[in-house]
Amino acid sequence: MNAQNSSCGLSGHEDPHKKQDLEIRECLGHIRNKILVMSGKGGVGKSSVAAYLSVSLAKRGFKVGLMDVDLHGPSIPRMLGLRGTIGPGSKDGKASPVPYLPNLDVISIEPLMGEDRDRATIWRGPLKIGVIRQFIADIEWRDLDFLIIDSPPGTGDEPLTVAQTIPDARALIVTTPQEISLADVRKSINFCRNVNMKILGIVENMSGFKCPHCGEAIELFKSDGGMLTAKKEGIAFLGSLPLDPLVVQSGDSGSMAILDDESSPFTRAFMDMAARVVREVEGDGAAGPGGSENSREVGGEVAPEPGSRILAVPVSDGKLCSHFGHCDQFAFIMTKDGKITGSEMRTPPPHEPGVLPQWISDQGASVVICGGLGDRAKQLLVEKGIEVITGAPMDAPESLANQYLSDTLITGDNVCDH
């Protein structure tokens, strides 16, 4: 690839750096959504989230590109089992990404490193910046709904270069629940704010492990840390992903087949997370696959307006019902910028295992305030990116919503309704 000789309709004797800036803007202008997947520290599953998200979006019918800019530890090709090589594009000096699915193309620096893929990349900052800029400029992408960019952990040269080179990219931050990871996430949040990069939301990975013998949920890395951080920082919480040994096996074998297993808790949680990602970008006015710029329909649901949240409260006799699964109705309270804008009472479907969490998610709720509920119901809600408040007092739903919005809600023990 040679950015100096490549062209997207530019000519003349412009300054090379300025010319490359113009070229990048023109060549990426037909990609509607750019998402930078980043993390404050390594080992949280960032590349796995980037790979699975790309495949999930492609399975939903979107046209997707996946770019791996981790120059020192590119792992995307191995996780996908990618065997193709970068080919010549239709324009002089351009390169064509490697097709993975009919509507998913992938690019990584690893295929450019020759036969020895275990060779260390020892580059200083200025060289890395130049390589990433040329890498972005010299790829000939087709029209895409999403470009997913997998960045190395931290807040160094690579994510900074992407933020400066693709100013309309939005950050998806991956963490695990424990404090040592969340401390670095807060640095990533501050990084995004300092470089004026929009934050799409936070994903909590490795959130609980279901024992294959007794079925009990084990919180290996604590729980809810990502959700609480998102709430404190005013950022969307996109969902929790459970630990699953099959994810590790799939990554080592270069297979994404786990996404075809609808019985897998990881797959269900990931598909819910991917749907929430789509809802978040739809809320910013982005179009769905083949949709118009004003389209806000996602899988039959209407995406919420930016800055809005819907709170769900189980209600009986006009007050919070202590039995989450046996209430008469749910109050759905619409809020925007911390204020109540409306409310509506809705009758839930018959109480069966797993039905209520899905129904609440389908109503667009992002917060549930309740007296108590079982661990399984809570886990299903959290996996769908819904914040769960338990131990709430038996007040009127709008009163509880105002207490929640003003951070004055006092909660007690979670009294399970079993």
Image (spheres, rainbow, N blue to C red):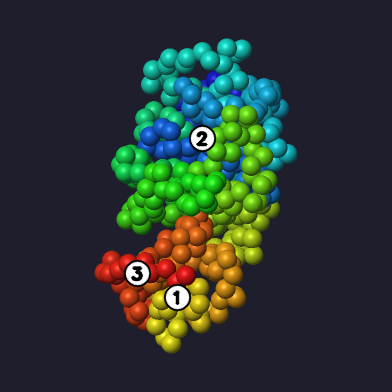
Kindly indicate the quadrant of the structure image that contains residue 154: top left
Residue 409 in picture, x, y percent from top left: 29, 70
- Circle 2: is it few (<14), some (14-19), or many (20+) Cα within 10 Å? many
Q: Residue at x 57, y 66 (%)?
A: 353
Q: Residue at x 66, y 47 (%)?
A: 261
Report helix, strand or loop for mark 1: loop
Residue 189 in picture, x, y percent from top left: 35, 44
Q: CA distance from mark 3 to mark 1?
A: 11 Å
Report helix, strand or loop for mark 2: helix
Residue type, mark 1 in image: His
Q: Is residue 172 left or right of residue 394?
A: right
Q: Which mark is residue 391?
A: 3
Residue behind mark 2:
47
Q: Which mark is residue 253?
A: none
Between circles 1 and 2, the one closer to the viewer is: 1
Nearest to the observer: residue 40 or residue 306? 40
Callout 1–callout 2 Cβ contact below 8 Å: no
Compared to 317, does 226 lie above or below? above
Residue 113 in picture, x, y percent from top left: 57, 15
Q: Which mark is residue 323?
A: 1
Q: Is residue 72 left or right of residue 405?
A: right
Q: CA distance from mark 1 to mark 2?
A: 40 Å
Residue type, mark 3 in image: Gly
- Circle 3: is it few (<14), some (14-19), or many (20+) Cα within 10 Å? some
Residue 121 in picture, x, y percent from top left: 47, 16
